[in-house]
Image: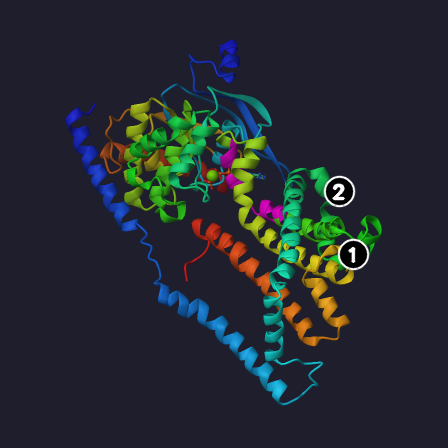
Amino acid sequence: MASTDTTAKDGTDLAGLEAGLDALDAVTTTRTPLRETLLRKVLPPITAVALVLAVWQLLVWLEVAPSYKLPSPGAVWEEVRTAWLQGTLLDYIWTSVSRGLLGFLFALAIGTPLGLIVARVRFVRAAIGPILSGLQSLPSVAWVPPAVIWLGLNDSMMFAVILLGAVPSIANGLVAGIDQIPPLFLRAGRTLGATGLKGARHIVMPAALPGYLAGLKQGWAFSWRSLMAAEIIASSPDLGVGLGQLLENGRNNASMSQVFLAILLILLVGIAIDLLIFSPLERRVLLSRGLLVKS
Amino acid sequence: MATTIAKAAEGGTATAHAARIEHVSKSFAGPAGQQLVLDDITLDVAPGEFVTLLGASGCGKSTLLNLVAGLDKPSAGSISTDGRPALMFQEHALFPWLTAGKNIELALKLRGVPKAERRGRAEELLELVRLHGAYGKRVHELSGGMRQRVALARALAQDSKLLLMDEPFAALDAITRDVLHDELTRIWRETGLSVLFVTHNVREAVRLAQRVVLLSSRPGRIAREWTVGIAHPRRIEDSAVAELSVEITEELRGEIRRHGQH
Ligand SMILES: Nc1ncnc2c1ncn2[C@@H]1O[C@H](COP(=O)(O)OP(=O)(O)OP(=O)(O)O)[C@@H](O)[C@H]1O
Ligand SMILES: [Mg+2]
C-alpha cells in the first residue's frame, strides 16, 4: 500500500500532466471581423442583383419586347412607390405572410408528431411511410380544386392547401433525421435511462434536429408555394388581396408592371423568411455541434 | 443464494455481488445459420471489485458487456446486477447537442436528481475527472482524452454500483491513456465502485485490475483467470506488471494459435 505522501505527490504530478495535455489539445476559436463578413457575404449578392438589373434595363433599351410584355425596372419601381404611398404594399405582403406563417405553424403541429410516429412505430411506417414520401412529389396546386369544392372560397381552404403541401415535407424531414441518428446515441440514452417518451424528448428529438430543420425549411418553401397557387386560382373579394391575388389582378388588368411587382414580392418574401428564420437557426444548430466549419 | 439474486435484480442493497453472470450463451443469426458468439459464461463481480475482461478482437467482449448492460438479451442463462449498471463505450458517446456539463446533468436528471442540485453535482463530477473549466464546452471543442473523461463523469453521474467499460481508452495515445488509467484507479478506490473493464490490451488489463479474465474466441468461453496482487499505485512500466503481462500474453497467443490448427 502506498503512503498518503506518495499519493499526494502522484496526484499533483498527474494534474500537471493532464493540464499540459489539455492545453495542447485545446481548440481556439476566433471571430471574423465585421468588415470581412460584409465583404464576403453581402457584396456578392448585391453584385448579382445589380447585374440582373443592368441586363434587364439593357433589354428594355434594346426593345427586345414591347413594354406591355417587358416593363422597365423604372415602371416596376413606380408600381412599388404607388402601392407604398397608397399604403397597400404592406397589406398585400402581410395578408399572404400571415396566412403562410399561420398555415406553416399548423403544419408544424401536425407534421412533427406524425413524423415521430412514422419513424418509431413500424406498423405505421409500413402503412403510410410510402404515401407520405409520395405526397411530397405531388404538386400542391393539385389540391386547390378539391379544397375549393370541399371548403369553399375562404381562409380554411387556403390553410388546407398549405397543410397538404407542408405536412409531408415536415414529417419526412423528421423521419429522415431520426433514421440518421447514430445507434450509439440511442444505446447511450438507454443506459442512462432515457426510454419511451423521455427518450424521444432527450435523445431522439435533439439528435434528429438537423434533419428536422431541413424538413422545416422545405416545409416552409412548400407552404409558400401552395399558398401562392391557392391565392392565384381562388380569388374572391372577401378573401382580401394577398400577393397571389395581386399577380392575378395584374394579369386581368393587363398591367405587366404589377405582375412583375407581385412576382418580385413573392420571391423576396420567400428569401427573407429563409434568410431571417431558417438559415440562422440551421447554422446555429450545426455550428454548436461542430458539424459546420466556420468560413 | 438464488433468492438473494432475485432481490438484487430488483435493486436490493446489500448483496454479495455487483454482477452475476450465470451460464450465459449468446448466438446471432449469421449467413451460415446461428453463430454461437458466447458459450456458457459464468462470472461474478464482487462489490468494489475491479475485473478486466481480456480477449482477442471479435471474441464477444462487447457482446457480453451489452448483455450485462441490458441492451440485449442472452440466448441462454441469466444475468443479474445490483441496480442498473453504467456503461462507457469505446467511443465517447457524448451528446453533441449538449455541453459537457449538460451531458452530465442529463444523466442526473434521468436518475431523478432535483434540478437545484444538478449543476453543483455536475461541477463536482467534472472536478473529479479534473476538468473544472469544461462545464460550458461543446463536445467537439474537447480533445479525445477530455471527451473520455467527460464520458467517465457522465457514467459516474448515474451513481450505479457497477461501471461497465468497453475499451474506453483504446483510441487514445499512450500518455493520455496512462493518465486516464491513473484517474480511473483513483476514482475506483475513492468511490468503491465495481468495475468490469473490457480490453484487448494485456498490459492495460494487468495495470488496472484485481482480477483478469481471459476469454477464448469463437465461441467466447472463459479460458483462464488471474488474480493480480500487485500493490497500488501501479505503473504500466512496472516490472511486476510486465511479468504478469508476459505470462498472460503467452496464454492469449496459445488461444489464438489453437484456431489456426483447425
Ligand atoms: N448484432 C450482431 N449480429 C450478428 N453478429 C454479431 C452482432 N454483434 C456481434 N456479432 C458478432 O459477434 C462476434 C463478437 O463481436 P463483439 O463485438 O462482441 O467482439 P469484441 O470482442 O467486442 O471485439 P473487439 O475487440 O473488436 O471490439 C463478432 O464475430 C461479430 O461479428
Ligand atoms: Mg468490442
Residue at the front extreme, as displayed: A86
Residue at the left extreme, as displayed: A5
- Which label was assigned to residue B42? none
Residue A231 appears at what percent x and percent y?
73, 59
Mark 2: secondary structure: helix
Residue at the right extreme, as displayed: A149
> Mark 2 = which residue?
A127
Q: Are marks 1 and 2 on the same chain?
A: yes
Residue at 34 percent across and 43 percent down: it is B145
Was residue B188 drawn as part of the magenta stretch in this picture? no
Q: Nearer the viewer, residue B131 or B226?
A: B131
Name the kind of residue labelled 1 in the image.
Val
Residue at 32 percent across and 46 percent down: it is B173
> Mark 1 = which residue?
A144
Does residue A144 sit above or below B93 in this rendering? below
The chain letter under disc 2 is A
Mark 1 vs 2, N-terminal side: 2
Name the kind of residue labelled 2 in the image.
Ala
Q: Is residue A100 left or right of residue A146?
A: left
